[in-house]
Structures are given as structure tokens and as C-alpha cells.
Image: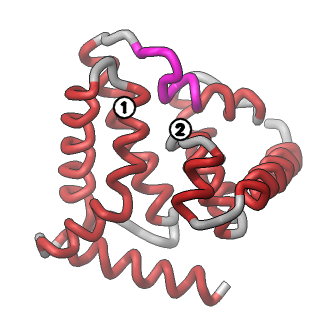
């Protein structure tokens, strides 16, 4: 738990520096999350150029809202993912672009469908945010694998290579994470 608090402090300090327009902090934020946001955008947008534009727009939004980041409400990765997802959904709605196969919504729908979630209505947005909070409670490797596989669209092999972790370990982490998430979703009382 001490590691999580230390990471929260590091994340909060980074976002304070971003809010203060510190160029190196903005670079750190991009280095840390740029590839994840790009993968989401590339899956959702009809063209690579539109995906690249969306990434720039997401990071502008992150910069503008950096002062509102609160590690007590969400881990930084969760916050970045939620802002990215909202921006991409808004952008797609505005342009009424066709989402190509393997899109963000299809990726999310596959995972969310397993856990009983679905579309992008306000209720579903809340459920997605609640799911992201549950993902935050997973051990670090499990959390990383779930976010990169289901929200970032990476293959398990890519995740293993980037993390320097054997493929079998990545598969096991994903399997354990899904079991834990199903248990936590099923524990909640039905309203």
C-alpha cells in the first residue's frame, strides 16, 4: 500500500508541474502515456492522421485539466484513460465517423460485455468509471496487463515484450485479473 501512496504522490506532483506549464513535465506525461493514448485513438479513428490529431487533442485536454487531477479519486492511468475515452467518443459523435473494426468501443464492449457492461450512455459511463476503479485495486502487473490489453489494444506478446516479462506470466496475470474483476463485479448488490 505504501507503494501506491508513493506513486500517487509522484503522479500528483507530475500533474501539478503540468498544470504549471513546465515543459519537461508535459514531456514526461507524454512519454508515460503517449503510446497508450495513441493505440486507443488508432483503434477508434478512421485514419492514422485523425488518430494522431486526437492524441494531440487529448494531451491538450490533459494539460488544461491537470490542476483538477486528484489521486484520491483515480490513479493517473485511469484518469488519462477516462479523459482519452471521453474525448474519442465525443470526437466520433461530432464527426459521425464510422468506427473501424477492432475499435475502442468494440474492444471495450468485449471486455465490458464479459463484466456485464455495454454502451456509452451516462449510466454506462458511470459503470465504466466504476470498473476502472476496480481495475485500480488490482496488483500492478495485473492492472497494467488489463489496461494495455483491453483499453490499449495491445497483444499479450507486445505487453510481455514492453514489460520484459515472459508471455506465460502476462497470460497468468490477465487470467487472475479477470477472475478478480468478475468476483468484484458480482459482489456488488443489484440496485
Q: Which colour assignment does the render follow?
A: secondary structure
Q: Residue at x 66, y 55 (%)?
A: 135
Q: Residue at x 56, y 64 (%)?
A: 163
Where in the figure is residue 88, as x and y percent of width and height? 35, 32
At a point 60% along the width and 85% down the height, the residue shown is 3
Give me the C-alpha separation between circle 2 and circle 1: 9 Å
- Would you say residue 100 sits in the magenta stretch? yes
Mark 2 and mark 1 residues within 8 Å of each other at the beta carbon: yes
147 is higher (above) or lower (below) than 18: above
Which residues fall within the magenta stretch?
99-107
Quadrant of the snapshot with the C terminus: top right
- Position of 13 with respect to 184 (left or right) is left
* Callout 1 secondary element: helix
* Residue of label 1: 42
The tag on residue 153 is 2
The reply, left or right, for residue 30 in relation to residue 138 is: left
Asked if residue 10 can be seen in this view, the reply is yes
Amino acid at each position: 500500500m505504501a507503494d501506491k501512496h508513493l506513486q500517487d504522490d509522484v503522479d500528483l506532483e507530475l500533474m501539478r508541474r503540468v498544470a504549471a506549464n513546465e515543459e519537461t513535465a508535459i514531456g514526461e506525461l507524454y512519454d508515460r502515456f503517449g503510446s497508450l493514448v495513441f493505440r486507443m485513438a488508432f483503434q477508434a479513428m478512421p485514419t492514422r492522421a485523425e488518430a494522431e490529431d486526437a492524441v494531440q487533442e487529448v494531451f491538450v485536454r490533459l494539460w488544461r485539466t491537470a490542476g483538477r487531477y486528484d489521486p484520491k479519486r483515480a490513479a493517473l492511468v485511469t484518469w488519462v484513460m477516462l479523459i482519452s475515452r471521453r474525448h474519442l467518443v465525443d470526437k466520433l459523435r461530432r464527426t459521425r465517423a464510422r468506427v473501424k473494426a477492432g475499435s475502442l468501443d468494440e474492444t471495450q464492449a468485449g471486455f465490458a460485455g464479459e463484466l456485464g457492461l455495454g454502451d456509452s450512455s451516462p449510466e454506462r459511463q458511470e459503470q465504466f468509471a466504476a470498473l476502472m476503479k476496480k481495475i485500480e485495486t488490482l496488483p500492478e502487473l495485473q492492472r497494467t496487463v488489463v489496461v494495455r490489453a483491453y483499453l490499449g489494444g495491445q497483444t499479450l506478446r507486445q505487453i510481455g515484450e514492453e514489460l520484459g516479462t515472459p508471455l506465460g506470466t502476462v497470460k497468468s496475470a490477465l487470467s487472475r485479473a479477470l477472475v478478480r474483476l468478475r468476483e468484484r463485479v458480482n459482489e456488488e448488490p443489484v440496485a
